[in-house]
Image (spheres, grey):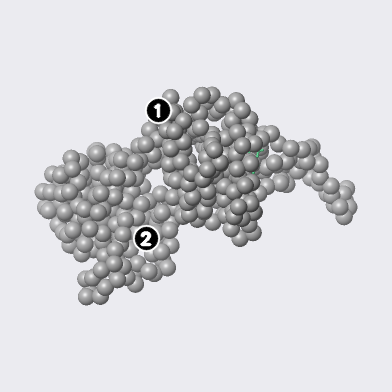
């Protein structure tokens, strides 16, 4: 594997020498990218001697090989160890003022950070927020661990041991190709059903879970067609820039139906979009006015086609279809409803989560249960929408293995 090791300014940089050695000893090609500050702790000759590759901190050397992006593009894995509070902040902001910054922006490989800092800095709300942002984008965080720190104090903030970082990162990179060659469709966001030229019936779906599903699949090697209904703010941005994700916009349920049918030959279809069950029967040509309608406005709604049920009914052999359901029930009633819904829609897996006025929608975190073909619970996961997405793909792979369709078609 082509591994980039970023090193930032912290005393734990001396331990990263061992990390680089361990990676090379397990047969990987390692390129070290220190920040200028890191070199105050361990110098260029050490990194060059140990990695056997030239080492620089800036984007202005070796310009002819476009090194500022080529390292990131070629990387199968990027590890930042130690990751200082300052570098985590720069990563969260997407700053690219040195070679490590550009490499991190140019890569689509799994990124692992091993934070190291004093406990107060680790616990600071700014650092917490930066870590949450990075996790949301799919960055993996290993450590820090609890133990003695440089100032003689003790607490969480110590960089994980180099062998632990290597084992974690290499395990991750191996898992990251388990969807290789699979063609998948993911739908995301909420449909908007027009009432008139300026108004619509919509829902609170932000698209975060669907986009996380698309990113997780693409990072694990799949070719992804992401069909996006309305998605909040810049949630779509990381997917739009991913080399293995093609985004198609679909505003209404009927547009989404067309886009899904166009892409229906995929190996896996994951319907995470919140599709309106009903649409206005006849959207008005002009804006609806109070003048025309008075105090009460009645709307005629007609049922939309159940897209996922149609796809499941017309599925080809070897195809896996996953539906999502957001329900306001809890406990056994939620599970019973989810089981009925899975059967009615004829899908392989149904991922159900509890939603309400203050839960489920718009948040960075999610909790869901995946129901399998015989109604059994095959996964229950709580965490960032990215962690939830990975668990859904694990369940998809497990389902394909048990139904004998594990091989890529
Ligand atoms: O019946 P309900 O709307 O709860 O079903 C949710 C699941 O069905 C989601 O996977 C959603 O994308 C899909 N769906 C659909 N077509 C509709 C409504 C929902 O494919 N008209």
| Residue hosting label 1 | 407
| Residue hosting label 2 | 89
| Residue 294 in picture, x, y percent from top left | 88, 52
Which comes before the other along the chain, label 1 or label 2?
2
Q: Within 10 Å of the Cα at label 2, are there few (<14), some (14-19), or many (20+) other Cα atoms?
A: many
What is the secondary structure assignment of the residue under circle 2?
helix
Disc 2 under 8 Å from ligand 1? The reply is no
Query: Residue 249 lies in what quarter of the image?
Result: top right
Taking 240 as reference, is 112 above or below it? below
Please state if 45 lies on the left or on the right of 216 as rendered. left
Q: Quadrant of the N terminus?
A: top left
Q: Quadrant of the C terminus?
A: top left
Q: Nearer the viewer, mark 1 or mark 2?
A: 1
Residue that appears at 54% across and 38% down: 374
Residue that appears at 21% across and 49% down: 32
The circle drawn on residue 35 is none
Please state if 253 lies on the left or on the right of 87 as rendered. right
Task: Find the distance from the CA under tag 1 to the CA under tag 2.
Answer: 41 Å
| Residue 168 in picture, x, y percent from top left | 29, 50
Inspect this view and state whether residue 327 appears: yes
Taking 377 as reference, is 95 above or below it? below
Q: Quadrant of ligand 1?
A: top right
């Amino acid at each position: 594997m082509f591994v980039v090791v970023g090193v930032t300014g912290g005393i734990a940089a001396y331990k990263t020498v061992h990390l680089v050695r361990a990676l090379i000893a397990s047969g990987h090609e390692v390129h070290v990218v220190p920040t200028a500050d890191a070199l105050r702790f361990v110098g260029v000759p050490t990194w060059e001697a140990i990695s056997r590759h030239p080492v620089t901190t800036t984007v202005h050397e070796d310009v002819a090989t476009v090194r500022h992006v080529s390292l990131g593009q070629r990387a199968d894995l990027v590890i930042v160890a130690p990751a200082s509070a300052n570098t985590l902040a720069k990563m969260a902001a997407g700053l690219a003022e040195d070679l490590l910054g550009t490499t991190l922006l140019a890569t689509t490989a799994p990124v692992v950070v091993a934070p190291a800092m004093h406990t107060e800095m680790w616990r600071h709300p700014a650092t917490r927020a930066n870590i949450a942002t990075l996790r949301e984008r799919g960055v993996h965080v290993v450590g820090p661990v609890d133990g003695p720190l440089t100032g003689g104090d003790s607490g969480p903030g110590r960089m994980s041991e180099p062998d632990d970082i290597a084992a974690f990162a290499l395990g991750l990179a191996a898992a990251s190709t388990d969807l290789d060659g699979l063609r998948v469709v993911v739908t995301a966001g909420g449909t908007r059903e027009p009432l008139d030229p300026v108004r619509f019936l919509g829902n609170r779906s932000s698209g975060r879970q669907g986009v996380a599903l698309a990113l997780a699949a693409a990072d694990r090697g799949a070719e992804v067609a992401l069909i996006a209904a309305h998605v909040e703010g810049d949630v779509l941005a990381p997917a739009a820039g991913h080399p293995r994700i093609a985004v198609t916009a679909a505003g209404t349920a009927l547009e989404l139906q067309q886009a899904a049918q166009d892409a229906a030959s995929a190996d896996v279809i994951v319907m995470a979009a919140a599709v309106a069950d009903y649409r206005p029967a006849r959207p008005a040509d002009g804006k609806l006015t109070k003048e025309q309608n008075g105090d009460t406005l009645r709307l005629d709604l007609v049922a939309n086609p159940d897209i996922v049920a149609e796809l499941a009914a017309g599925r080809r052999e070897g195809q896996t279809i996953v539906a999502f359901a957001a329900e306001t029930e809890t406990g056994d009633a939620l599970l019973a409803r989810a089981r009925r819904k899975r059967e009615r829609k004829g899908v392989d897996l149904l991922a159900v989560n509890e939603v309400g006025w203050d839960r489920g929608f718009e948040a960075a975190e999610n909790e869901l249960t995946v129901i399998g073909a015989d109604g059994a619970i095959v996964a229950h996961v709580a965490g960032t929408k990215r962690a939830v997405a990975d668990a859904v793909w694990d369940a998809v792979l497990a389902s394909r293995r048990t139904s004998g369709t594990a091989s890529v078609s």
